[in-house]
């Protein structure tokens, strides 16, 4: 996994940092802090209510994956071994998240499975040949007005798109648009999923989080141990099949 | 990465132990003001990726590749262990002298003991400093620490793997005070502690900002006869990659949805 890479200096300086916090830069909205979904659905499905636009191959892969995990639950490592759950599944979580913003990086810490999702604030993906595909992929971010656009690629094939074990291919490309709503009390993540092997077209889903100044994130998730009480999170029943 | 290569990585990036018996003065966190504290300009320069830096002499081939590597058992630390903690360490060392490395949180997919002195080995860590929160990310097993700036520890502190951390600036030095550690974690292999453990970290840039120095002082009246201080240096690093212990680690079963955590330290 480890490859020797030459040292790359960390660009950026104190001036940019100071401007960022003084709010005199491009006035990026402050989305930092703890957020927690008020409701959660194990199935991530198109927000317009349409069925999943599965290709014939995608349908076969989905059915096979569901059968495999039903036979051996350890195949869903994101649930069984608490490995990083990938994107979008990691964002469709019933546990809180904590966002930290600095000028060069937005970090979205997912309490579930204790996964820091590092979003490099830049316009271009690194040369992905230098990086092994990973659970969380390579995420880059930029501000489009008041919306944080996160573009993620280079995923490994060990994750599912959601808890119904909807699989993806190595061509998965996820674009998220995060924006504040309800006077800054809500964070909406509009997720566009593109995977030409699995789907006939890209499709959009949406998850949202409520601002929580009353709780602190937990940083030491251990698989199979008791976790935070999530009974206050409303479970939204959706069709788990296409 | 398998267990063997993990040990090689450890051996190739030994810690820069510089133990000292420096006088320890507990910072007055209880008196920390609640008002926001301005960050010094160096905060921006501390942000980014770092990795442990060994400025000692190069190790000859083979040295440190065994489980008996003395670097893991610094004499100055052993010297301050109270009898029960010393017994626990001896049990660990005896087991480590055999073919099979005994279980420690490190090789059982459990959260690493804090702070970064041993948690990074040679792997990158990432500082994300803001006025209200400092986040420190570790490549090893996708771990993160949250340091609440200019706050006090809660009174009814729940014991956790990473404890609870508060921070403040003393000039250009970032000072972090942590406590509330559970009794499962170990900050050096086989070295245990009590719930009274307190750790003070002091980070400052050195060498015109090309390096960072971290000074760690451990105080535990139930486990150590005196505070133990170690200094570690960091160099700037390439970004971290994803490192998922449960797929790399083959020594001991990782906790899973069915079993939870099975690990108990040798005592």
Image (tube, coloured by chain):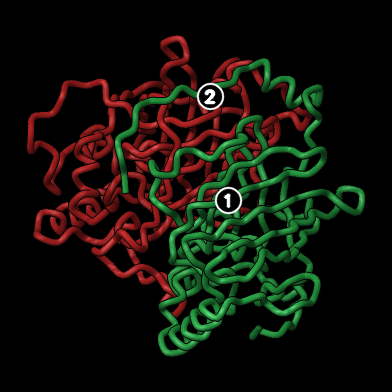
Classify A135 as above or below A128.
Answer: below
Across and down, in percent, residue A181 comes to 87, 52
Dot label at residue B103: none
Q: Which residue is pictured at 64% across the width and 60% down the height?
A: A91
Q: Residue B80: x and y, percent?
A: 29, 37
A6 or A112: nearer the eye? A6
Chain letter, disc 2 residue: B
Quarter holding the C terminus of chain B is: bottom left
Marks 2 and 1: which is nearer the front? 1
Q: Residue B46 has which mark? A: 2
Q: Colour of chain A?
A: green
Q: Nearer the viewer, residue A84 or A125?
A: A125
Q: Is residue B231 visible?
A: no
Q: Is residue B103 left or right of residue A162?
A: left
Who's red, chain-wise? Answer: B
Would residue B113 appear left or right of B102 to someone viewing this image? right
The residue beneath circle 1 is A152
| The image quarter in which residue B61 lies | top left
Q: Quadrant of residue A110?
A: bottom right
Figure check: A10 above or below B125 = above
- Which residue is pictured at 65% across the width and 37% down the height? B133
**B232 shown above or below B252:** above
């Amino acid at each position: 996994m480890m490859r020797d890479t030459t040292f790359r200096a960390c660009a950026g300086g104190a001036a940019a940092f100071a401007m960022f916090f003084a709010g005199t830069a491009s006035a990026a909205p402050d989305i930092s802090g703890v957020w927690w979904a008020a409701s959660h659905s194990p199935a991530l499905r198109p927000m317009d209510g349409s069925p999943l636009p599965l290709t014939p191959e995608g349908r076969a892969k989905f059915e096979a994956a569901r059968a495999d995990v039903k036979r051996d639950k350890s195949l869903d490592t994101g649930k069984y071994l608490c490995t990083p759950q990938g994107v979008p599944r990691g964002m469709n979580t019933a546990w809180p998240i904590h966002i930290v913003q600095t000028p060069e990086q937005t970090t979205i810490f997912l309490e579930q499975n204790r996964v820091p999702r590092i979003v490099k604030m830049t316009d271009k993906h690194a040369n992905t040949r230098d990086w092994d595909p990973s659970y969380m992929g390579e995420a880059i971010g930029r501000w489009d007005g008041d919306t944080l656009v996160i573009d993620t690629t280079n995923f490994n094939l060990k994750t599912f798109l959601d808890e119904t074990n909807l699989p993806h291919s190595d061509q998965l490309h996820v674009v998220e648009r995060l924006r504040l709503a309800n006077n800054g009390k809500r964070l909406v993540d509009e997720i566009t999923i593109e995977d030409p092997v699995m789907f006939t077209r890209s499709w959009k889903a949406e998850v949202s989080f409520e601002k929580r100044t009353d709780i602190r994130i937990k940083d030491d998730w251990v698989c199979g141990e008791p976790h935070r009480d999530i009974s206050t999170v409303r479970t939204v029943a959706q069709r788990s099949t296409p | 990465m398998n267990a063997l290569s993990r040990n090689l990585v450890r051996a190739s990036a030994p810690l820069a132990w510089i133990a000292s018996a420096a006088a320890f003065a507990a910072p007055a966190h209880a008196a920390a003001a609640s008002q926001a504290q301005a960050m010094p300009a160096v905060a921006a320069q501390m942000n980014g990726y770092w990795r442990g830096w060994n400025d000692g002499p190069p190790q000859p081939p083979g040295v440190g590749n065994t489980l008996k590597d003395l670097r893991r058992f610094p004499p100055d630390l052993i010297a301050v262990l109270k009898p029960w903690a010393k017994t626990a360490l001896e049990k660990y060392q005896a087991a480590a002298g055999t073919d099979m490395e005994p279980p420690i949180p490190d090789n059982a997919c459990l959260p690493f003991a804090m702070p970064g002195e041993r948690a990074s080995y040679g792997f990158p860590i990432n500082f994300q400093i803001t006025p209200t929160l400092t986040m420190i990310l570790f490549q090893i097993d996708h771990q993160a620490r949250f340091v609440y700036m200019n706050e006090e520890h809660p009174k009814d502190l729940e014991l956790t793997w990473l404890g609870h951390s508060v921070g403040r600036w003393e000039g250009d030095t970032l000072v972090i005070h942590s406590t509330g550690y559970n009794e499962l974690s170990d900050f050096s292999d086989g070295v245990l502690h009590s719930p009274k453990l307190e750790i003070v970290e002091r980070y400052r840039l050195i060498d015109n900002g090309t390096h960072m120095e971290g000074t760690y002082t451990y105080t535990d009246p139930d486990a150590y006869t005196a505070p133990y201080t170690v200094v570690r240096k960091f160099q700037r690093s390439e970004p971290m990659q994803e490192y998922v212990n449960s797929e790399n680690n083959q020594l001991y079963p990782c906790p899973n949805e069915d079993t939870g955590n099975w690990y108990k330290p040798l005592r």
